[in-house]
Image (cartoon, grey):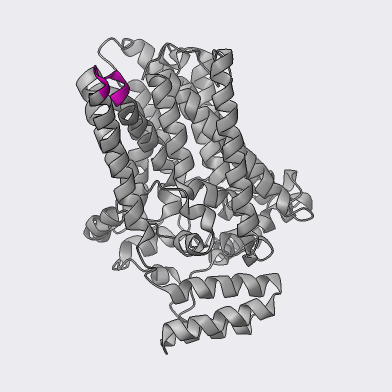
Amino acid sequence: MSSSGPPGVPDPARGLPGRGRRPLALAIALVVVVKVGYFLQYADLPFLKGPLYDSVVYLRQSQAILEGDFGHPSLLAFSPLYGWFLAALGAGSAPLLPVAAQMALGLASLVLLFRLGDRLWGRAAGIGAALLYFGYGLFLFYETKILSETLAIFLLIVTLTIWSSRGFEAGRALHGLGTGLVLGLAVLARASLLFAAPLFAIGAALRWRAQDAPWRGRSRRAGLLALGLSLVLLANGAWNLHHSGFFVPVIFASRTVTTATTTGWSGSLAAYGDPRTGADPSAWAVVEQAEERIRAVRRGEQDPAPIVPRIDLLGALEAAPAKLARLFGDTETSFDYGYLGERGEVGTLRLLPVSFGALLVLAIVGSVLLVRSDGARSLVPHLPLLLGTVLLTFFFHPSSRYRLPMTLPLILLAAHAVAAPAGLPTRKARALAAGALAVVVAVFAVRGWTRDLASPSTWELRVAQGAAAAGDLVERDRRIRRARRLGKGDPDVERRISAILERP
């Protein structure tokens, strides 16, 4: 993954001639126009005023921080850095400011990916990486949600930028420590990245190419990365110990992993709900577990939760094939806001043609081309996020939120495939190769556009729930009527409607 470009986080206009900067500026302007158009359409849905699920917990984190309650259970149960991000932006008094900041971070991520692809494999790869990132609608989708995905993705792209630099490959202290420090911040922004974090240290110790640094140099860069990562997590653990009495480097290990490995996995998230009442999974359940532990220890009692949660490896292995099939499937699975349902109502999202299936196919092509030109070792720098997501899915469950970080190495490898036609000798060959790649994207796009929602009543109930949280009872009732019509007497739909109507 070595490159001839400058190490570190690049300036998006650096090295571009005058004529080269104008297309970049026009492209950025187009992206901004699409983002604004999407936001204006999205504002018709109730979620900006009525956030759901994990968003409510993150807002409670920011409130606790602003009140000086740094040992609040929500900060030990959910990724804490995003709560600080919201608090710094005054999310409670200015709810639209975090969305604006996340849209700006999304734009910065696009520019960084352009420069990273350019640095790795040339201008065509940079353009391809930017187009694929922009065309995959999940990134824009999460920019408008009070969720930590956009912040974590930005920090991961900064991590990959330093990780792929000549300075890191040479084992320079600033680059090694910097990679670990930024990766540590990404973990605090999205705790599920903890599965991938140690794989970065392992990957740093491996050869990336035949002429890579000797073992001493590779162990140095791996050690520096591990040191930077450890400094961030240990500092957070010490902070939590001071304010809560618990040394928690990232978050508490919840009971979810026990449920995920011991429950016969059917693809439904209902298994993570309350088995006594049949209630849907609740983000507050994890916070309540943390609160229970804090109260018990403060009363002088034994910690009621085990340090290491019980894991049924046989149960996890039994469910692994179905989980991995869902992980690599060309669909978007979510238990919060519902990307596919939103895309059906927000026309701007339908303009973005890149699907996960297209990314996966193009990334496979790019991987084959990369191995043919640079050898199998050249794939090593792309593996930590890929394998980390597989491990996460093995122990938990597949979802679009969990696999979003995995799309970054897929985008870079796919960009290598997109750039390949530019190196062909004749115009006809270049046109045919580019056309074949475009057909791949188009086939998956049409497949996605023509696919019906698996459960349209579920989407209507999500909107109804958001409307209820926003205080829009007219919209709540309208969506409930539509859900009843689509559900056709389904008792589960009626149960969820009752739960929405019972909320104050």
Q: State the residue in front, 244 or 43.
A: 43
Q: Could you tell me what secondary structure mostly forms the magenta stretch? A: helix
Say which residue appears at 52% left-offset and 62% top-offset.
Answer: 337
Q: Position of residue 390 (x, y in %)?
A: 32, 46
Q: Quadrant of residue 267?
A: bottom left
Q: Residue 422 in magenta?
A: yes
Q: Residue 297 in magenta?
A: no
Q: Is residue 34 above or below residue 74?
A: above
Which of the image's four quarters has the C terminus? bottom right
* One can see residue 184 in this view: no
Q: State the residue in front, 311 or 475.
A: 475
Q: State the residue in front, 378 or 339.
A: 339
Q: Position of residue 426 (x, y in %)?
A: 24, 19
Q: State the residue in front, 73 or 348.
A: 348
- Which residues lie in the magenta part? 420-427
Q: Position of residue 16 (x, y in %)?
A: 54, 15
Q: Position of residue 131 (x, y in %)?
A: 45, 36
Say which residue appears at 22% left-offset and 56% top-offset.
Answer: 321
Q: Is residue 332 above or below residue 100?
A: below
What is the total number of numbered labels drawn onto the structure image?
0
Q: Is residue 191 left or right of residue 295?
A: left
* One can see residue 432 in this view: yes
